[in-house]
Image (cartoon, rainbow, N blue to C red):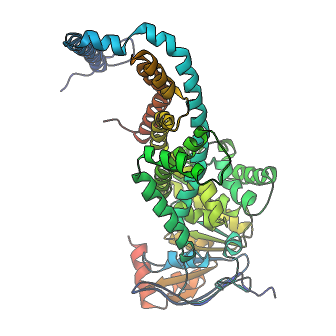
Amino acid sequence: MTSAEPVLRITNLHKRFGDVHVLQGIDLEVFQHQVVVVIGASGSGKSTLLKSVNLLEQIDDGQIFLKGEDISDPRIAVDKARARIGVVFQQFNLFPHLTVLDNVALANRRVHGLSRDEAETIARHWLDRIGLGHKLRDYPDRLSGGQQQRVAIVRAIASDPELLLLDEITSSLDPLLVGEVLDLVSELKAGGSTILMTTHEMQFARNVGDHVIFLKDGFLLEQGTPQQVFDEPQHPATREYLSRVKTH
Amino acid sequence: MNSAPVTTESGLSGVELGRRAFRKKQSGRSVLISLASTVMLAAIVWLTVVNTPGWALVQQAFFDPKTGANFFPSILLGLWLNVRILFFAVIGVAIFATLIAVIRTLRGPVFYPLRLIATVYTDLFRGMPLIIVLYLVGFGIPALGVTPRLPPEVWGTLALILTYSAYVSEVLRAGMEAVHPSQRLAARSLGLTHAQTLRLIVLPQGIRKVVPALMNDFVSMQKDVGLVSVLGSIDAVRAAQIAVADTYNFTPYIVAGLLFVVISLPFIRLTDWLAGRAQLREQIGGKV
């Protein structure tokens, strides 16, 4: 494996829901320490793309490689592959019956075989870092939306995944709380995390993204650096989408 | 309105003080009304019953304090057997019902035979009267001649477990299915296996959702423990029956019945309290 091997490589990915062809042959690569941002309207296939990468959706064609290993091969251990990828959902999906600390420590204890002490030490470290060290014993419903989403993010990265998937993580947040969540993502990027994310926050995509991908109706229509995609979009559909989100 | 609210020494406006006084008066009146109506209803029921033509006979046959006191110790001893049966039956139901509920939620064609057996089992035992299950298990299984001689209460416990697991597994299944699919998704995305997801995420949340229903089944089971008497175990009901046969007086039945009520009361209250607490939690932000 050379250093040029991407963390994630997707080739010719297809996904159908019945008659609806949601992803129509997607090719993309995410390299180490890179933040790749997927933009596009609702229903363009962004979320399905992320779910497919985490094997939460069964794909209809194509291949997904995680550090060179084909994780779309049904013969591999699905749970092991998933354990190498962290996911954060739009709706947080914290476990309501577990404390904040247990939420974050769960995967390290149960999946990665750490002792309770080791797992909790790591969880404490992360929760301290996001300023929630005083909420360890609280249950998620006592936290604000922004706090819950930050807990969900550290739950996903506590086990040090090779790839982090963020699926519209600010879409269900109060506008005032979006900033605190996106700041944490910027911090993770600075810390060297490899991230594939979908978002409607164009300013954030421009500032933090290394590579931007535009999806429409299951097709990857345009990709490039944020400057290329936002300042000199080549495809008419990209131009139309950007003009709409910018002038809303 | 142009009158500014008058602030009193308590720091509250006169308007608010007026509202509070009104609410206080209202709730005081409600308490009086409910108290009066309760006393009246009790009086009516009492007077009606004691004025029936046969009351003197019924009082003698069912409510004779002397007979009741005489047989109280033997009935209480019988109740101890009921409590022990209940203890083991509850453990058995907890294990077996969870197993059946989990089997019924398994997906995939591999598990079809297991699912089928579980479905047939729950359908059969929810429909079959407990007393028939008791006869089948209590007299049928020993008659096969392959088991060692066991006291009838063991078979009674087994019959209770078989019948109640069918109900409880359905309640548990409903609870597990009420857990939002996104919870499974989140668990699997962390790398938890299917079994870990069930055990650590779905079951704990599912059980919480159905605690009041489970407690209700438990209370129901508590009284059905009395049916093991049909197999010949000397439990509270059987002890009362023996006493009745001795004296031709039915008071021992009333004693046994009241004892069953007494042991179930704490759980009934606990169930109400749990249900009330859950309701309160869900109604944060307004009670209508």
Viewer-proximal residue among A186 and A128: A128
Q: Position of residue B80 (x, y in %)?
A: 59, 26
Vertical position of residue B176 compared to residue B190: above or below = above
In the rendered view of the protein, which quadrant contains the N terminus of chain A?
bottom right
Vertical position of residue A188 compared to residue A41: above or below = above
Q: Is A37 positioned to the left or the right of B67 in the image?
A: right
Residue projecting furthest to the top: B66
Measuring 41% from the left and 47% from the top, which residue is drawn there? B129
Measuring 66% from the left and 47% from the top, which residue is drawn there? A132
Q: Position of residue B146 (x, y in %)?
A: 65, 54
Vertical position of residue A108 compared to residue A96: above or below = below
Measuring 47% from the left and 63% from the top, which residue is drawn there? B119
Q: Is B14 positioned to the left or the right of B186 in the image?
A: left
Which quadrant of the view contains residue B11? Answer: top left
Residue B252 visible (yes or no): yes
Viewer-proximal residue among B101 and A38: B101
Viewer-proximal residue among B270 and B17: B270
Q: Position of residue B262 (x, y in %)?
A: 48, 22
Viewer-proximal residue among A120 and A214: A120
Vertical position of residue A213 compared to residue A171: above or below = below
Instruction: Count how many numbered circles sit on residues in the image.
Output: 0
Q: Is B44 positioned to the left or the right of B183 in the image?
A: left
Measuring 61% from the left and 41% from the top, which residue is drawn there? B154
In the rendered view of the protein, which quadrant contains the C terminus of chain A?
bottom left
Residue A180 visible (yes or no): no
Q: Is B115 positioned to the left or the right of A136 in the image?
A: left
Q: Position of residue B209 (x, y in %)?
A: 48, 47
